[in-house]
Image (cartoon, rainbow, N blue to C red):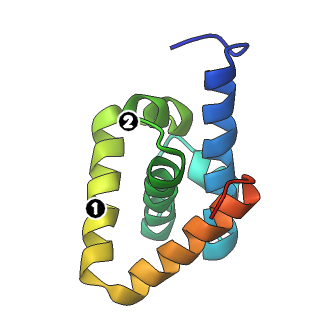
Amino acid sequence: MGSIQDPAVFLAARRASLAQFIVAQVHGVPVEELRKPTRGRPHVARARQISIHLARRVFDLNHRQLALEFGRDRSTVHHACCLIEGMRRQNDQFDSTLTWMETLLRRAAGMPQ
């Protein structure tokens, strides 16, 4: 993928970390829990899946980048994205919450709305 000096790798890492931080704050989960290699408790796993989904949707990171930054397999990243997208379609309140979190993430990253 590239070395740490590679600007694209550095930017992907920063953006993934920002997604983890925002989701951790909103869900009341320590960011360290999201970064653990184990699945963790169900609410931690769900917060991690949301972080992955938001990083994909807001920053357009591909599954390979997300797998690297979240310490997961690409199939796990794919599953997380599909799962959260399905939950958004089924639950308007959940969708609204994630839309709000996307806005927070864009603002925190200095991106246009």
Q: Residue at x 36, y 43 (%)?
A: 77
> Residue 106, position in %: x, y?
65, 59
Total marks shown come to 2
Q: Describe residue 109's horizontal placement relative to residue 53 as left or right.
A: right
Look at label 2 and name its amino acid.
His
Look at label 1 and name its amino acid.
Leu
**Residue 95 makes an appearance in the image:** yes
Q: Residue at x 33, y 74 (%)?
A: 88
**Badge 1, how many Cα within 10 Å: few under 14, some, many 20+?**
some
> Residue 39, position in %: x, y?
44, 51
Instruction: Compare residues 106 and 93 and report the one nearer the observer.
Output: 106
Which quarter of the figure is the C terminus placed in? Answer: bottom right
Which residue is at the far bottom?
93
- Secondary element at tag 2: helix
Q: Mark 1 = which residue?
A: 83
Q: Describe residue 49's horizontal placement relative to residue 35 as left or right.
A: left
Q: Is residue 17 above or below residue 46?
A: above
Which comes before the other along the chain, label 2 or label 1? 2
Q: Is residue 59 above or below residue 96?
A: above
Q: Residue at x 55, y 34 (%)?
A: 69
| The image quarter in which residue 33 lies | bottom right
Q: Is residue 108 above or below residue 79?
A: below
Q: Mark 2 = which residue?
A: 63
Could you give the CA–CA distance between mark 2 and mark 1, rounded to whole angstroms?
14 Å
**Residue 29 makes an appearance in the image:** no
**Badge 2, how many Cα within 10 Å: few under 14, some, many 20+?**
some
| The image quarter in which residue 86 lies | bottom left
Q: Describe residue 55's horizontal placement relative to residue 111 as left or right.
A: left
- Secondary element at tag 1: helix
